[in-house]
Image (cartoon, helix red, strand yellow):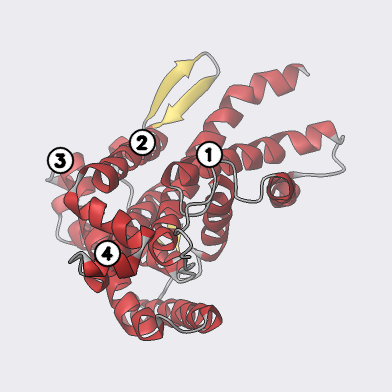
Amino acid sequence: MELALEILPQVLLDGIVLGFMYALIALGYTMVYGVLEFINFAHSEIFVLGAFVGVEVLLLLQSAGYLAILHPLIILLLVIVASMVISGFAAMALERVAYRPLLGGPRLVALISAIGASFFLQDGLRLFESLWRNTFYLNYPSLEFLDQTVPLAANLVIPVKSILVIVTALMTLAGLYVFVNRTKLGMAIRAVAQDPDTASLMGVPVNQVIALTFFVGGALGGLAGVLFGIHYSLVNPYTGFIPGMKAFTAAVLGGIGNIPGAMVGGMMLGLLEAFAASYLSLMTDGAFGAEYKDVVAFLVLILILIFRTKGLLGEKVRESKA
């Protein structure tokens, strides 16, 4: 019991950081679903693309000697902006090529297209990095200020990179809320999500709004990819599969299509994983270890969906027409 209490602050911190990471990725899923009622299963590869753009920008700056000259915050801003822009445009291109021609068709066809696009992006990244650097396992260059720690208590320190994840996630959620609810573009997105046919009759360019939604979702995925790379260092073309599945789970847990729900679901999933990884072994006297954390997280998801089928905060869907 004493050991459990001793490690509790660190477990909470790890769970919060992991939860915010899942929430950032889940926001991309929930943005697209809110407009199209469609799960973009290629979003995890957009996330990985952002991570690779980030590491490539850092490596280029390092080879040119700019890492030692530029202020770390400027470097970080350059990396984040580049990843968000390229990931956003990649998501837009994906929507235009793989999804728009299938609008109005069976949902299964669009789902298969999304899975195919996912494999295409995976292998495309692997091919590019193999030709460019002769390896597709890349490590993020170290930024000294991100490797520092801040003491919070006698037995608890928080890395600066963890603070970066938490602060960025909170700012992103606030910014996304303002964008969706307080701007004309956000109003157009909500109109298309509510009723695309009526929105079109009212002069809203539906296809452009859908493309914008994919751009925003892709940019959020790119941001999450950079933060993931900075926090965990190593990235490869297949890095996105597990975080992508967890983020999709977080979106369903909070209520698919619900922006605050994605954040709540991500936090809950991250804390569940952290507690399971740290306490399962203690509670079962070593019979079950950290490898069972995913079982616990998905078991809780199943139980919640049995008793609350639309997630914790409810699913956001279009109004049905009479």
Say which element carries label 1.
Answer: helix
87 or 38, nearer to the observer: 38
User: Is residue 212 toward the left or the right of residue 316 in the image?
Assistant: left
Mark 2 / mark 3, whichever is N-terminal: 3
Residue 199: assigned label:
4
The residue that appears at 48% across and 38% down in the rendered structure is 17
Residue 267: assigned label:
1
Q: Write down the residue under mark 3.
A: 71
Which of label 2 and label 3 is nearer to you?
2
Please count the marks in the image. 4
Label 4 – label 2 distance at C-alpha: 31 Å
x then y, percent, for residue 210:
30, 68
Looking at the rendered structure, the kind of residue marked 4 is Ala
Which of label 4 and label 2 is nearer to you?
4
Say which element carries label 2.
Answer: helix
The residue that appears at 85% across and 39% down in the rendered structure is 286
Please say if the residues under marks 3 and 4 sit with CB atoms less than 8 Å apart. Answer: no
Label 1 – label 3 distance at C-alpha: 32 Å
